[in-house]
Image: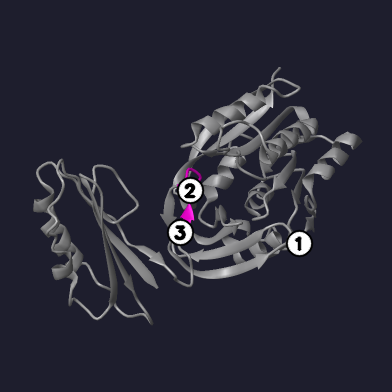
Amino acid sequence: NTTTTTTTTTSSSSTTSTSSSSSSAPSPKLPVVRLLHGVSDLSLHVTVRLVAPALLSIDVTETLVGGEDGLGESPLDALCAALRPLAGAGASLFRFPPLVRGTPINPYVPTADGLLIQYDFDGVAYEAQSEFQNIKIMSSRQFGGMLLLDDDPNLAESDLPYTNAITGNGRIDYTGKRVLILGGGDGGILKVLLQQKVEFVYMVEIDGMVLEACQKHMKRACGTSLDALKGDNYEVVVADCIPWLKEQAGSGRLFDVVINDLTAIPVTPDGLPTGDQWDFLRLILELSFNVLKPDGRYFTQGNSANLPSSLATYEEQLGQLAKPVAFSKEVVTVPSYHEQWVFYEIWFKA
């Protein structure tokens, strides 16, 4: 295991562990070696970088083997205290938490807008490579089982706010409704719908391995909804939803509610709605509205509230559908995402 801690003199934030800023170059007589030498028999590597006249970065890396104790807080606190007067009046000193590398379980997962989150994972409940994607279910003390597909967080057992939001948060009476779920392999949406008096629910999920993994390792999310692929008022179809939707449209079958839980709104480097992901999104929109009743409702996740340009681009795409639609949106805090998430409700204009 390798833990990296850094002390930096800077006027802006950085990916390091401690920082400060000064209007003049800091004194070269920094007590780094004196403060860190002899504190333990650990393998330490210290890098001092003068990046600019007022920017000093000090990285302290320690290598721990076999669960031995680390450097501890005291030497680093002493180093920060010694740096503070050297930095000068008006300087800012930041000490960031250590970065942990080389552990059996990688605790880091980025948010949708690129921020790094350190999770409290204490185990891997399941991992496999399916025909379509890498599947992991991580064990978290806070969030329970947490499903990651190609290392992208999908849902944790703690994330009932996500499931409630994508099913309308109580705004829809599902009594007697025919409902279609696209994706939803964690079983959370199906569980919530089966607790209501729906007429029938179809769920179309392409990856059977996701269903099997969540049925076994995410019971708090799915309950018993994935124990069987068919019931009196539901059916889970393991298939690609695109030909399935085309088949339903061809047969004239319509749904009161379509819930799209396939993927979030794409984030492209140039901000333009181009590329395979946007093409897929537009195709799903078109096919979904082909099977939606005139007075039906379409629910879908959007993306992080911190990505307003991507959300605006999606809303522009809604304006280009063959039939005019209106929409509303709701912002919900999803516990395991560590960020606010946007959900859409869309319907045909009268």
Residue at position x 44%, y 70% from top? 102
Q: Quadrant of residue 130?
A: bottom right
In this picture, is 55 found above or below 100? above
Q: Main secondary structure of the magenta part?
A: loop
Q: Which sits in the foreground, 129 or 175?
A: 129
Amino acid beneath label 2: Thr
- The numbered dot on residue 145 is none
Name the amino acid type tagged 1.
Ala
Depth check: give the residue in front, 90 or 195.
90
The image shows residue 247 at horizontal and vertical percentages of 88, 40
Report helix, strand or loop for mark 2: loop
Q: Which residues are magenta?
A: 109-114
The answer to whether any part of residue 90 appears in the image is yes
Residue at the image position 66 percent from the left and 63 percent from the top? 215
The residue where tag 1 is placed is 228
| Viewer-nearest of discs 1 and 3 | 3
Q: Residues within 10 Å of mark 1 (few under 14, many from 20)?
A: few
Marks 3/2: CA–CA distance? 10 Å
Q: Is residue 35 left or right of residue 308?
A: left
Image spot of residue 320 (x, y percent): 69, 22
Residue 216 seen in render: no
Residue highlighted by disc 2: 111
Determine crowd level at label 2: few under 14, some 14-19, many 20+ residues with C-alpha closer than 10 A: some
Residue 2 on the magenta span: no
Q: Secondary structure at mark 1?
A: loop
Q: Is residue 112 magenta?
A: yes
Disc ID at residue 108: 3
Residue at (78, 45) in percent of width and height: 241
Q: Residue at x 20, y 64 (%)?
A: 76
Please state which of residues 94 and 318 is positioned toward the viewer in this rendering: 94
